[in-house]
Amino acid sequence: MQAGAVELSHGFHCLADPNRIRIIEILADGRKSVTELQTHFSMSLPGLLKHIRKLEQGQIIRTTKLGRTVYCELQHSPLELMEHWIHRQTSFWTESLNRLNKELEKKAGPMAGKSRKGR
């Protein structure tokens, strides 16, 4: 498996939980302490830390410790890689479906007129 595929797999796996998606949304506004993040959730601190570690393992976020405070911030590179992959897939399927639609219209064109006359 290619390195990019592994990174994509880890990234999408990180996004497979609504709590982790919410953490990413909150961090989109900038760096936050774990304490600040916890105010947005009704889960325990150990529960939140589990999600933070998972996002760290997927390299979606980075944590830094200043004194006794742990801060989290987004790492944009993995998210950009995922966005690029999604864009490529969307383009491929859009173009493929457009070509299919044109072919179906070509083939249905003469038949569509006959079926309308027979009604």
Image (cartoon, grey):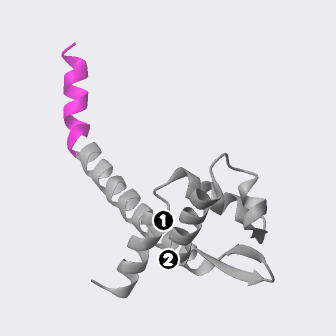
Along the horizontal axis of the image, is 31 left or right of 4? right
Q: Position of residue 74 (x, y in %)?
A: 66, 73
The residues colored magenta run: 107-119
**Residue occupying the far right of the picture:** 67
Q: Which residue is mark 2?
A: 57
Which of the two discs, 1 and 2, labels the residue nearer the N terminus? 1
Q: Quadrant of the N terminus?
A: bottom left
Q: In the image, is residue 82 part of the stretch drawn in magenta?
A: no
Amino acid carrying mark 1 in the image: Cys
Labelled pair 1, 2 in contact (Cβ < 8 Å) = yes
Residue at position x 38%, y 61% in the image:
95
Q: Is residue 82 left or right of residue 4?
A: right
Measured from the top left, where is residue 112 in percent x and y? 24, 30
How far from the left and from the top, in percent, is residue 41?
68, 49
Task: Point out the residue furthest to the top here.
Answer: 119
User: Would you place residue 9 above or below residue 94 in this image?
Assistant: below
- Amino acid under disc 2: Gln
Relative height, residue 88 to residue 6 (above, below): above
- Reading the image, the residue beneath label 1 is 14
Numbered circles on residues, count: 2
Q: Which of 44 and 108 lies nearest the eye of the viewer? A: 44
Viewer-proximal residue among 49 and 110? 49
Give the residue at x 54% y 51%: 18
In space, the residues marked 1 and 2 are separated at their CA atoms by 9 Å
Q: Is residue 9 above or below residue 3?
A: above
Q: Main secondary structure of the magenta part?
A: helix
User: Looking at the picture, does residue 43 appear above or below residue 75?
Assistant: above
Q: Residues within 10 Å of mark 2 (few under 14, many from 20)?
A: some
Seen from the viewer's position, the closer of residues 69 and 52 is 69
Image quadrant of residue 32? bottom right
Quadrant of the image containing the C terminus: top left
Foreground label between 1 and 2? 2
